[in-house]
């Protein structure tokens, strides 16, 4: 069996499993694992110069300025669903193939998304505060609602959105969705999901808007104050476990102040967002952790190893 000479794992928190390491060692004569801090741009340049295959994470940026004059790396694996930290055009120009893990943590993000919805609808943090402060039921007004009484809207129709839709419909929740190509997602039809004609119309018809789109020039800043002004239902909640760029900067703070949102759950943020200005009782925040669990990282490491090894073997067999 043909092998490559060297494969480098550049991120110290790769969460290797015996299965993933066995796969990688089966395709490379040497597997180097970075045991220090996350690599600097200069270290990434060195890796790209010295190794045949490189594994990075979501915080390693592969842009033209990190490429060495003599590129050795042919395969770039990223422990992530998204690839917006990689200049795909620059990689293609240099013959560098990019392999990601498009669905490995879909269940984790979907669980987090629904947990966020339940936390907001059931007013979990308000209930906790009421008990601790001794106000009990008087401290929770108006009372919580049932998720099954809500209509949930999904912006996007990828693997995560599908998991959310499948579990929500099993809970008797009405689910509507929008995507650029609904005809390419018939699996949603089988769940009873109703398609709407535009993101704005989706916003108008639902109680909870959950964002599941990639960050692209088309989607950047899609959710702003004019967009949220289309909402016509009460209560109205927003969940974003996708990318911060989908929401225009400062939109959340302004929407809460203008009562366009009852509450919001955010797993991603803009650098310029002043989180201390967001009211604690109406904002559920997490540090881009929706898809990061001990279980999902183990699944992702195996999935990435499988996909990377399969691609390398396929390429090595070519004449």
Image (cartoon, helix red, strand yellow):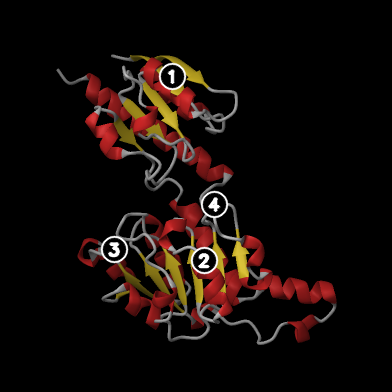
Measured Cα–Cα span from mark 1 to mark 3: 44 Å
Answer whether labels 1 and 3 touch (C-beta < 8 Å).
no
Answer whether labels 1 and 4 touch (C-beta < 8 Å).
no
- When the figure is inspected, residue 94 is found, relative to residue 184, above or below; the finding is above
Measured Cα–Cα span from mark 1 to mark 2: 38 Å
95 vs 224, nearest the viewer: 224
Which SS class for mark 2? loop
Badge 2: how crowded within 10 Å, few (<14), some, or many (20+)? some
Badge 1: how crowded within 10 Å, few (<14), some, or many (20+)? some
Question: Residue beneath label 4, please?
Answer: 288
97 vs 127, nearest the viewer: 97
Tell me which residue sits at (74%, 71%) in the image: 128
Question: Residue beneath label 3, please?
Answer: 187
The mark nearer the N terminus, 2 or 3, is 3
| For discs 2 and 4, the disc positioned in front in the rendered view | 2
- When the figure is inspected, residue 151 is found, relative to residue 301, above or below; the finding is below
Residue 135 coordinates in the image, percent (x, y): 82, 81
Question: Residue beneath label 1, please?
Answer: 46
The image quadrant that residue 202 belongs to is bottom left
| For discs 3 and 4, the disc positioned in front in the rendered view | 4
């Amino acid at each position: 069996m043909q092998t490559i000479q060297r494969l480098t794992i550049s991120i110290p928190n790769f969460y290797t499993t015996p299965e993933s390491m066995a796969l990688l060692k089966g395709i490379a004569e040497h597997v180097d694992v970075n045991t220090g801090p996350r690599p600097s741009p200069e270290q990434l340049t060195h890796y790209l110069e010295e190794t045949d295959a490189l594994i990075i994470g979501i915080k390693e940026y592969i842009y033209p300025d990190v490429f060495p004059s003599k590129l050795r790396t042919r395969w770039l694996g990223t422990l992530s669903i998204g690839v917006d930290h990689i200049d795909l055009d620059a990689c293609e120009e240099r013959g560098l193939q990019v392999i990601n893990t498009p669905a490995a943590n879909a269940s984790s993000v979907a669980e987090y998304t629904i947990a966020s919805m339940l936390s907001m609808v059931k007013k979990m943090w308000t209930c906790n505060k009421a008990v601790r402060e001794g106000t009990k039921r008087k401290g929770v007004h108006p009372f919580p609602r049932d998720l099954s009484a809500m209509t949930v809207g999904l912006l996007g129709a990828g693997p995560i959105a599908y998991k959310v839709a499948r579990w929500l419909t099993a809970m008797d929740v009405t689910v509507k969705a929008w995507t650029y190509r609904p005809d390419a997602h018939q699996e949603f039809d089988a769940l009873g999901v109703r398609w709407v004609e535009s993101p704005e119309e989706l916003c108008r018809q639902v109680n909870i808007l959950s964002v599941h789109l990639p960050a692209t020039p088309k989607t950047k800043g899609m959710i702003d104050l004019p967009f949220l002004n289309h909402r016509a239902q009460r209560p109205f909640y927003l969940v974003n476990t996708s990318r911060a760029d989908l929401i225009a900067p400062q939109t959340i703070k302004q929407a809460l102040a203008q009562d366009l949102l009852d509450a919001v759950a955010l797993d991603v943020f803009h650098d310029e967002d002043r989180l201390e200005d967001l009211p604690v009782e109406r904002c559920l925040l997490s540090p881009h952790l929706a898809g990061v669990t001990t279980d999902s990282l183990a699944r992702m490491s195996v999935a990435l190893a499988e996909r990377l090894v399969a691609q390398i073997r396929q390429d090595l067999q070519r004449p």
